[in-house]
Image (cartoon, rainbow, N blue to C red):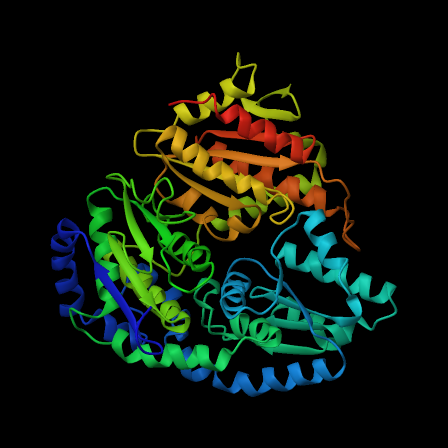
């Protein structure tokens, strides 16, 4: 960690990379890119990006403009505690949930995060003490299907317990959104800054409200960001954001299109998951970009043995590039560096042109649920239904062998687990196992939350990925009030819909549906032992 609150540091430890990055550092300094970004110059990314950039740059001053929120959050927290309400549930996806999860986990305060459509995980949240529960419903657009489903389910649960739902729901959304219109009878509505995109919103109401209500010191977070803001605005060769942007872009120029993130003792919990969305969704478009690969630690497959197609970036000391600092400072460092990398890569870091495709496909399947089985051959291998295997393939090991073998030399495997990330947490072992067996960079994402993160890169970035979807029958299901579907139906529609979009881009997709989740995961891990590349 850095020595002073808010201080951030970036060190390029690889001599070759340092030499390659030097001209790009000089370019950013000569272009006054850092100071122009601080002054919210929307012309930095070219004419085509100007309209979007013009309404997406307010994050550079959030350490100042978010200050009025602090008293409001403290007052609401005190009110709720006086009523015996001290259990905070956050219903939000992507930028509405990732930052609060990092903030509260690092602070060591409890926050229940619902960024899922898995009925088991939602049921566990419902099973807690509702008398002590407040639900923060966070959605920038105000129309996020997962978050709307959570809102409906919790409102019904409160009413069933004789609790006034309106007194227990807090809303965070953009001004004028459909959610704001619905929230007239709710406990409180916090309007977020509409000129900040979701993935840059850590220091807006989306990050601060749920974290502050849970007990995190969000004032200190803003202090940390403020302490580093001046450094990041400087047009100098030792600006940490300039160094990080140049290093990632220089590596990409020679083929290192993946950024392997490992925590090496930063003191921050889960930062890689937040940075994953920021980098993937900001850069993964127009057939280019940087794919974050979040790994289990510095000894994990893919980090210490990163090949020519990847750059090992440490959250803490070590790696080809090391980054360090306080949490507030690190949020701002990575936001600056990602935006500057967008300029060097020649893309607009503030749009997400391919995210909507999977949502549309899922909606179409909800309208026609008989199509949810998906296309392609299907067969049963033990407790696993195999969907989408090529003709002639009759076993799970063959299907996995074909999938991994179809990845090009410097491609990647994306494991997408549409399961309960608490009860089915063992699924995460699939990432290191596949990486070890195949030698390919391998990502792991919980569905559908990754659709609001790496989902953009999968469709818009380098088209060299292969996709392993894991779905499963839920033990119980939950109907969504006033909607013609359950969470289980929605979850499967999201998986199959995204698979259809990927297949339409000629990317290999294999879906494994677990008839028994525990037994299916055990069978899958056992079968992986027979896979080779």
Front residue of 315/204: it is: 315
Name which residue lies at 56% across and 40% down.
427
Is residue 76 depicted above or below 441 in this figure?
Answer: below
In the drawing, does residue 268 fall left or right of residue 493?
left
The residue that appears at 38% across and 77% down in the rendered structure is 225
Return the x and y of residue 285 as percentages of the image width and height. 37, 48
Q: In which quarter of the image is the N terminus?
A: bottom left
* Image height of 20 relative to 107, above or below: above
In the picture, which quadrant includes the C terminus? Answer: top left
Pinpoint residue 371: horizontal percent, then vertical percent: 67, 32
In terms of image quadrants, where is residue 127? bottom right
**Which residue occupies the extreme top position in the image?**
392
> Residue 329: where, in percent of width, then height?
36, 72
What is the x, y in percent for residue 35? Answer: 24, 75
Above or below, 193 relative to 532: below
* Residue at 65% over, 81% down: 77
Q: Residue at x 41, y 82 (%)?
A: 223
Give the quarter of the image for residue 171.
bottom right
Residue 158 in view of the camera:
yes
Q: How many numbered discs, if any?
A: 0
Q: Is residue 167 left or right of residue 305?
A: right
Residue 50 seen anywhere in this rendered image of the structure = no
């Amino acid at each position: 960690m850095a020595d002073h609150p808010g201080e951030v540091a970036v060190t390029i430890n690889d001599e070759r990379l340092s030499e390659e990055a030097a001209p790009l550092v000089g370019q950013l300094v000569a272009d006054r890119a850092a100071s122009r970004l601080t002054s919210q110059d929307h012309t930095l990314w070219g004419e085509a990006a100007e309209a979007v950039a013009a309404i997406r740059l307010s994050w550079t001053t959030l350490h100042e403009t978010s200050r009025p929120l602090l008293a409001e959050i403290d007052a609401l927290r005190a009110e709720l505690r006086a009523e015996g309400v001290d259990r905070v549930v956050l219903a939000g996806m992507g930028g509405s949930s990732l930052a609060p999860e990092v903030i509260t986990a690092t602070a060591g305060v409890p926050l229940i995060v619902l960024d899922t459509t898995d009925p088991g995980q939602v049921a566990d949240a419902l099973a807690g003490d509702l008398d002590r529960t407040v639900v923060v419903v966070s959605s920038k657009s105000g129309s996020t299907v997962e978050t709307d489903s959570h809102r409906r389910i919790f409102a019904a649960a409160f009413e069933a317990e004789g609790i006034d739902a309106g007194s227990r729901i807090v809303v965070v959304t953009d001004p004028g959104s459909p959610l704001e219109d619905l929230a007239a009878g709710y406990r409180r509505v916090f309007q977020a800054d509409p000129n900040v995109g979701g993935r840059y919103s850590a220091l807006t109401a989306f990050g601060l409200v749920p974290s502050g209500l849970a007990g995190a010191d969000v004032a200190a977070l803003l202090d940390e960001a403020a302490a580093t803001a001046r450094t990041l605005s400087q047009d100098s060769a030792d600006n940490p954001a300039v160094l990080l942007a140049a290093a990632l872009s220089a590596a990409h120029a020679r083929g290192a299109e993946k950024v392997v993130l490992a925590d090496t003792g930063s003191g921050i919990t889960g930062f890689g998951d937040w940075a994953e969305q920021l980098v993937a969704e900001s850069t993964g478009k127009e057939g280019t970009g940087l794919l974050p690969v979040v790994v289990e630690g510095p000894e994990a497959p893919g980090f210490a043995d990163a090949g020519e197609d990847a750059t090992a970036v440490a959250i803490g000391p070590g790696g080809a590039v090391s980054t360090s600092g306080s949490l507030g400072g690190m949020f701002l460092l990575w936001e600056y560096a990602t935006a500057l990398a967008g300029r060097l890569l020649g893309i607009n870091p503030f749009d997400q042109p391919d995210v909507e495709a999977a949502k549309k496909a899922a909606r179409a399947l909800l309208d026609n649920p008989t199509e949810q089985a998906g296309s392609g051959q299907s067969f049963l291998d033990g407790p696993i239904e195999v969907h989408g295997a090529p003709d002639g393939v009759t076993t799970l090991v063959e299907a996995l062998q074909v999938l991994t073998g179809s990845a090009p030399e410097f491609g990647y495997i994306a494991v997408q687990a549409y399961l309960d990330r608490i009860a089915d947490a063992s699924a995460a072992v699939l990432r290191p196992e596949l990486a070890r067996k195949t030698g390919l960079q391998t990502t792991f994402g919980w569905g559908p939350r990754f659709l609001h993160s790496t989902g953009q890169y999968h469709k818009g970035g380098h088209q060299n990925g292969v996709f392993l979807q894991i779905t499963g029958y839920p033990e119980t299901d939950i109907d969504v009030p006033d909607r013609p579907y359950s969470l289980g139906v929605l979850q499967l529609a999201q998986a199959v819909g995204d698979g259809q979009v990927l297949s339409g881009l000629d990317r290999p997709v294999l879906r494994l549906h677990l008839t028994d989740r525990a037994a299916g995961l055990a069978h899958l891990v056992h079968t992986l032992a027979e896979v080779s590349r």
